[in-house]
């Protein structure tokens, strides 16, 4: 059963326990510059506060709700698409989707072309530009925990229930129930976006105001290039045969060149 | 200044000597200086990483090296497979005189692309991974296999020329292999030229709809084909200066007409594409993307079509204009796909990219190395004075200031 995580945006108080848990579990180094940034600072950055060593970020957006100004915290990380663009774009299989849900990266297989970064519909992948031998980095959704029936590090420490780990199907039903009960925006972000994602978001304010890519396609991204890749060997074979035929025909009663 | 080295095989036997020459002109010294500077930057890139040598960042993971060295390099080298098709498969023999020089340009273009890629990717020592770890869903997988195999094929095709001078014993085997090499050598580029366009198809909603299209593969393929004639004209007029050698007007005019035909097809497809997507309004919005998009079509396609099918293509001046506009149009197109088309999306939250001077140096350096290699090969192998061209008195016999003779 594919796992997922439900993010109930209004429930988040911005304590950032999840970010700390992520750092500790994944043994990511602390950066003094990043440590001093606030959730407001990160919300304004082009990269949404995600860096090679910051796999998740809590970003605060000030939005209008019923005429008054409210602050909302959005946990940001890889969405772990059901049918990921990055996995299909990787020409050396350095990225793969586990049946349990996580989209994981293996630097051993990576060539470093960064096509995954270009293909990602949510612009989540980061590159270690400062290293002589760099790799791609992003949230791995704690694969060693998830495949051993444990929940992700971040969800295990959330004190308010803003992030819940579980079976994706059940979480989707739960999300729809909460939308109805709490009068949220009628959209589970991640249900259909980019063909569906393991991370699901619900919110009481419009997703547009929270820097979500609301106009993203609902088709799975690999489906765009699938047909082309399947046809290529046949087109190539046919074309070579046509060329060979033409070559023989046109050279028939002629002196060879030279 | 002339450097001539003579190697004599087996002293005592009759004069069976190999002569290598390389003239040193001010222009070639400039090329060498740029190449040396580029090599220095490349060392910095390998020791300190991409961050030290480029302005690439997480919003702009692809920059000048992808746009220029790879996309443009492959496109501009497209003349190679195009002329092979016209000459060897369709047997339009009147173009035979330009076959070797075009195929050489193409080979050197691909070597630049491969070198550029090795510098560009993060873990260059892993370049072989896709040969064993098949990411066959990726369009890049197709590009990778085809570009690398085609480069090897082109090297073998060149060996057929080279063995006229060195390792002569192998010549007859290579000659026998040529038909296969030629056919595979046309099939592969047809596939990867299209795939380079298809690479951007997965960037749904990121790439500007003016360029994002289901027709990206035919657009890239057709433009790589019609830029062939442009490159031949530009190259032959530059090489013509260097070697005092001109390709006959009817040969070039014939190529320009073929190229013009492909342009008409391209233009029709562009219009159909706009009609299907409903992007006429975007195309005539006269913002920056729209102006660049229209310039691509007007200067890079429509005006060259007019030149091709009017009396203008009967003059050297007209042909040169065709060549320059054709090449410039394709350059603009590839840059638009990578930069203009992605700009609005990637910069929406304050992203920014402009190539660092070091990136320019590396790109120019790779081109300089290719130019030097071209000049060396043309001077030492039978390339441009190959059958059917009007050789206007070779300068190769001009007395040099300096000569080395090794025995």
Image (cartoon, rainbow, N blue to C red):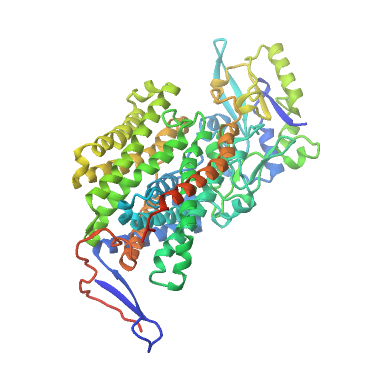
Is B253 on the left or on the right of A107, as rendered?
Answer: left
| Quadrant housing residue A119 | top right
- List x then y, in percent, for residue B374: 34, 60
Marks counted in the figure total 0
Residue B272 location, quadrant: top left
Does residue B167 appear in the picture of this structure?
no
Farthest residue to the right: give it: A149
Q: Nearer the viewer, residue A253 or A134?
A: A253
* Residue B345: x %, y % from top left: 46, 30
Please state which of residues B360 and A61 is positioned toward the viewer in this rendering: B360
* Residue B14 visible at all: yes
Q: Residue at x 50, y 37 (%)?
A: B198
Up-down relation of residue A23 to residue B148 (above or below):
above
Image location (x, y in percent) of residue A45: 51, 33
Residue at the image position 65 percent from the left and 45 percent from the top: A28
Quarter of the image with the N terminus of chain A in it: top right
Please state, as top left, top right, bottom left or bottom right, where the C terminus of chain A lies in the image: bottom left
Q: Position of residue B22 (x, y in %)?
A: 30, 69
* Residue A47 higher or lower than B158, as above or below: above
Image position of A210 (left or right of B293) = right
Extreme bottom residue here? B12
**Left or right: B304 in relation to B267:** left
Please tell me which residue lies in front, B274 or B404. B274
Residue A12 position by quadrant: top right
Up-down relation of residue A127 to residue B219 (above or below)? below
């Amino acid at each position: 059963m594919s796992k997922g995580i439900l993010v109930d945006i209004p429930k988040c108080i911005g304590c950032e326990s999840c970010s700390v848990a992520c750092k500790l579990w994944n043994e990511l180094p602390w950066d003094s510059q990043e440590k001093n940034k606030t959730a407001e600072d990160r919300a304004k950055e082009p990269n949404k506060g995600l860096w090679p060593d910051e796999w998740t970020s809590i970003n605060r957006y000030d939005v209008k709700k019923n005429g008054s100004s409210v602050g909302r915290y959005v946990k940001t990380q890889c969405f772990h698409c059901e049918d990921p663009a990055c996995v299909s774009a990787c020409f050396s299989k350095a990225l793969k989707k586990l049946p349990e849900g996580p989209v994981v990266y293996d630097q051993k297989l990576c060539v470093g072309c960064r096509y995954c970064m270009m293909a990602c519909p949510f612009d989540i992948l980061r590159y270690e530009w400062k290293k002589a031998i760099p790799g791609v980095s992003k949230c791995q959704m704690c694969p060693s925990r998830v495949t051993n029936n444990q929940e992700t590090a971040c969800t295990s420490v959330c004190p308010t229930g803003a992030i819940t780990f579980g079976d994706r199907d059940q979480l989707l039903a739960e999300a729809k129930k909460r939308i109805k009960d709490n009068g949220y925006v009628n959209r589970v972000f991640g249900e259909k976006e980019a063909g569906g994602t393991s991370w699901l978001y619900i919110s009481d304010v419009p997703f547009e105001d929270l820097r979500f890519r609301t106009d993203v396609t609902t088709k799975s991204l690999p489906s765009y290039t699938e047909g082309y890749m399947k046809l290529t060997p046949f087109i190539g074979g046919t074309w070579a045969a046509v060329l060979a035929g033409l070559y023989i025909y046109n050279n028939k009663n002629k002196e060879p060149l030279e | 200044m002339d450097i001539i080295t003579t190697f004599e095989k087996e002293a005592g036997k009759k004069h069976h000597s190999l002569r290598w020459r390389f003239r040193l002109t001010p222009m070639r010294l400039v090329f060498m200086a740029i190449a040396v500077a580029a090599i220095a930057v490349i060392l910095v890139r390998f020791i300190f990483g991409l961050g030290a040598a480029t302005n690439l960042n997480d919003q702009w993971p692809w920059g000048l090296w992808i746009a220029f060295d790879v996309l443009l390099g492959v496109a501009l080298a497209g003349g190679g497979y195009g002329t092979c098709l016209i000459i060897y498969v369709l047997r339009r023999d009147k173009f035979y005189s330009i076959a070797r020089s075009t195929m050489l340009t193409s080979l050197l273009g691909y070597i630049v692309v491969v070198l550029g890629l090795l510098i560009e990717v993060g873990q260059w020592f892993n370049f072989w991974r896709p040969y064993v770890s098949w990411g066959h869903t990726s369009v890049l997988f197709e590009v990778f296999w085809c570009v690398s195999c085609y480069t090897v094929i082109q090297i073998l095709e060149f060996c057929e020329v080279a063995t006229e001078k060195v390792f002569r014993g192998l010549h007859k085997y290579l000659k026998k292999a040529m038909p296969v090499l030629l056919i595979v050598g046309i099939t592969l580029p047809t596939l990867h030229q299209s795939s380079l366009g298809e690479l951007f198809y997965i960037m749904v909603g990121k790439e500007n709809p003016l360029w994002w299209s289901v027709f990206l593969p035919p657009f890239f393929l057709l433009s790589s084909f019609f830029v062939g004639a442009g490159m031949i004209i530009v190259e032959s007029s530059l090489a013509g200066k260097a070697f005092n050698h001109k390709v006959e007007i009817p040969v070039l005019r014939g190529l320009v007409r073929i190229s013009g035909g492909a342009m008409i097809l391209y233009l029709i497809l562009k219009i159909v594409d706009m009609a299907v997507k409903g992007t006429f309004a975007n195309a005539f919005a006269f913002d920056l993307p729209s102006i660049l998009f229209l310039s691509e079509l007007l200067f890079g396609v429509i005006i060259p079509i007019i030149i091709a099918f009017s009396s203008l293509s009967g003059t050297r001046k007209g042909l040169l204009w065709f060549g320059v506009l054709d090449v410039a149009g394709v350059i603009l197109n590839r840059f638009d796909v990578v930069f203009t088309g992605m700009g609005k999306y990637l910069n929406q939250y304050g992203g920014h990219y402009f190539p660092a001077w070091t990136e320019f140096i590396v790109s120019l350096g790779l081109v300089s190395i290719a130019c030097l290699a071209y000049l060396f090969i043309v001077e030492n192998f039978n390339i441009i004075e190959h059958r059917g061209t009007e050789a206007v008195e070779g300068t190769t016999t001009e007395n040099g200031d300096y000569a080395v003779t090794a025995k």
